[in-house]
Image: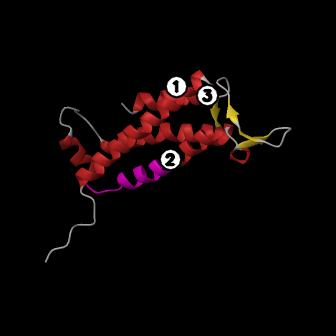
């Protein structure tokens, strides 16, 4: 009797990393566009920060896998000179910049405001206040294509 492998293959690591980066890219693009149109709840930024830190931890683990650069290069022969760990490092640098912007500019202790009637409303980030986020988002979007 054989048991299924519990370890991911190199192929799974590469494809999972690309898929996670694509999902993160889509989420950042959506928040960038939304923050340009209207005020956005601080909870959206806090949630994105959590997702980014999760992705960074995954990327840190992937670059340590023996053979990942060689395998990724064979997976994408049309991308001459591809060094997977360098691609991940670029994504990570751009993602860290977004996470840093969120930590500096969004206060997780103020997710809700209480008005004079005692009603709670979500704390919002204005389009002007989110301009720095959009700049960092553009940098990330340029790296993850």
Which residue lies at the image location 73% right of the left edge and 44% below the top edge?
110
Question: To which residue does mark 1 refer?
Answer: 33
Select label 2 or label 1 by which is in front.
Answer: 1
In the depicted structure, whether residue 108 falls above or below residue 78: below
Left-right relation of 35 to 52: right
Which residue lies at the image location 33% right of the left edge and 43% below the top edge?
19
Magenta segment boundaries in residue numbering: 53-67
Mark 3, Cα crowd under 10 Å, few <14 / some 14-19 / many 20+, is some
First in sequence: mark 1 vs mark 3: 1
Which residue lies at the image location 38% right of the left edge and 44% below the top edge?
20
Provide the secondary structure element on which disc 2 rests: helix
- Taking the magenta stretch, the answer to whether it contains residue 58 is yes
Kindly indicate the quadrant of the structure image that contains residue 112.
top right
Could you say where residue 37 lies in the image, as x and y percent from the top left? 58, 21
Left-right relation of 56 to 64: right
Mark 2 touches mark 1? (CB < 8 Å): no
141 vs 42, nearest the viewer? 42
Could you say where residue 132 lies in the image, as x and y percent from the top left? 61, 28
Question: To which residue does mark 2 refer?
Answer: 51
Mark 1, Cα crowd under 10 Å, few <14 / some 14-19 / many 20+, is some
Residue 132 numbered mark, or none: 3
Could you say where residue 140 lies in the image, as x and y percent from the top left? 46, 32
Left-right relation of 89 to 135: left
**Main SS category, magenta section:** helix
Which residue lies at the image location 54% right of the left edge and 48% below the top edge?
50
Provide the secondary structure element on which disc 1 rests: helix
Mark 3 touches mark 2? (CB < 8 Å): no
Kindly indicate the quadrant of the structure image that contains residue 100.
top right
- Outermost residue on the left side: it is 1
- Taking the magenta stretch, the answer to whether it contains residue 73 is no
């Amino acid at each position: 009797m054989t048991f299924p492998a519990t370890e991911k293959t190199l192929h799974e690591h590469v494809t999972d990393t690309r898929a996670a980066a694509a999902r993160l890219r889509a989420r950042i693009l959506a928040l960038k566009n939304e923050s340009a149109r209207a005020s956005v709840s601080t909870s959206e930024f806090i949630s994105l920060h959590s997702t980014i830190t999760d992705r960074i931890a995954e990327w840190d683990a992937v670059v340590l896998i023996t053979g990942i650069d060689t395998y990724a290069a064979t997976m994408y022969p049309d991308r001459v000179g591809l060094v997977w760990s360098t691609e991940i490092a670029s994504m990570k640098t751009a993602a860290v910049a977004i996470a840093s912007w969120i930590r500096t500019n969004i206060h997780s202790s103020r997710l809700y405001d209480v008005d004079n009637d005692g009603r709670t409303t979500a704390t919002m980030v204005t389009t002007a206040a989110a301009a720095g986020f959009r700049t960092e988002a553009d940098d990330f979007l340029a790296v993850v294509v």
